[in-house]
Amino acid sequence: MSSFFQRQLADYVQYHRAPWNCAMHVFGIVFLFLAAVLPLSRWPIAAFGIQTSVAAIATIPVLIYWFLLDFALGAAILGAAIVLLSAAAIIVAQANTVGMWSLTAVLIVIGSASQVIGHQVFERRRPALVDNPIHLLLGPMFVMAKLFIVLGFRRDLAIIIDERQQGPLSSS
């Protein structure tokens, strides 16, 4: 884990102390990722002799970034991204254009609302990305780090997250 990632994660945790805010982020991040890749999944493309979609190609830079921040978390996010990209491919294969755009709009509204409600209602603080736009890319890393900790892995992450989450809103 890079020192840059440690600092960014520690800063991100300060905006995500309330357990309900963290739970809302799990759904919000998944819905927003799916909303972002859904329309791009409609455009097939051949890359390196492999048939794929613009969505898969568009995720490569951010996946590389996550791998560079932390290889294990990046690998886990890659697995989640494959599942979500596969779900998007299935959806676009079954839905017409209006249905796909309607679902995209619903996912954006629900995903964004869960983020806003999580911060406004449970955290009583504005979203982290308002103060530091790079936090937009740290959300998936934070969610995956929390999952690793719950499963008993990555004590180094637990130290950063649990130590920083000790605040007035961290009680369950």
Image (tube, rainbow, N blue to C red):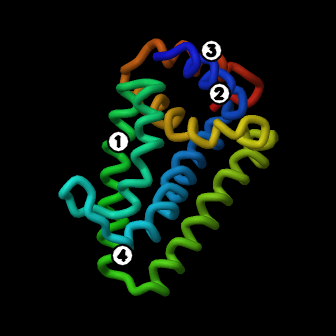
Cβ–Cβ under 8 Å for marks 4 and 1: no
Q: What residue does disc 4 label? A: 92
Counting residues from the start of the chain, the first of labels 3 and 4 encountered is 4
| Crowd band around label 4 with a 10 angstrom C-alpha radius: few (<14), some (14–19), many (20+) | some
Please state if 165 lies on the left or on the right of 91 as rendered.
right
User: Where's the C terminus, which quadrant?
Assistant: top right
How many marks overall?
4
| Crowd band around label 2 with a 10 angstrom C-alpha radius: few (<14), some (14–19), many (20+) | many
Camera-side mark, 4 or 2: 4
Horizontal and vertical percent position of residue 45: 31, 66
Q: What residue sits 66% from the left and 18% below the top?
A: 164
Amino acid on which the number 3 mark rests in the picture: Glu
Q: What residue does disc 1 label? A: 78
Q: What residue sits 72% from the left and 53% below the top?
A: 117
Q: Is residue 149 visible?
A: no
For numbered disc 3, what is the local secondary structure?
helix
Horizontal and vertical percent position of residue 81: 37, 49
Amino acid on which the number 1 mark rests in the picture: Leu
Q: Nearer the viewer, residue 26 or 44?
A: 44
Report how far apart the C-alphas of labels 2 and 3 lie in the structure: 9 Å
Report how far apart the C-alphas of labels 4 and 2 lie in the structure: 35 Å
For numbered disc 1, what is the local secondary structure?
helix
Amino acid on which the number 4 mark rests in the picture: Val
Please state if 134 lies on the left or on the right of 32 as rendered.
right
Cβ–Cβ under 8 Å for marks 4 and 2: no
Cβ–Cβ under 8 Å for marks 1 and 2: no
The disc placed on residue 13 is 2
Please state if 4 lies on the left or on the right of 33 as rendered.
right
Counting residues from the start of the chain, the first of labels 2 and 3 encountered is 2
In which image quadrant can residue 79 be found? Answer: top left
| Crowd band around label 1 with a 10 angstrom C-alpha radius: few (<14), some (14–19), many (20+) | some
Q: What residue sits 68% from the left and 30% below the top?
A: 17
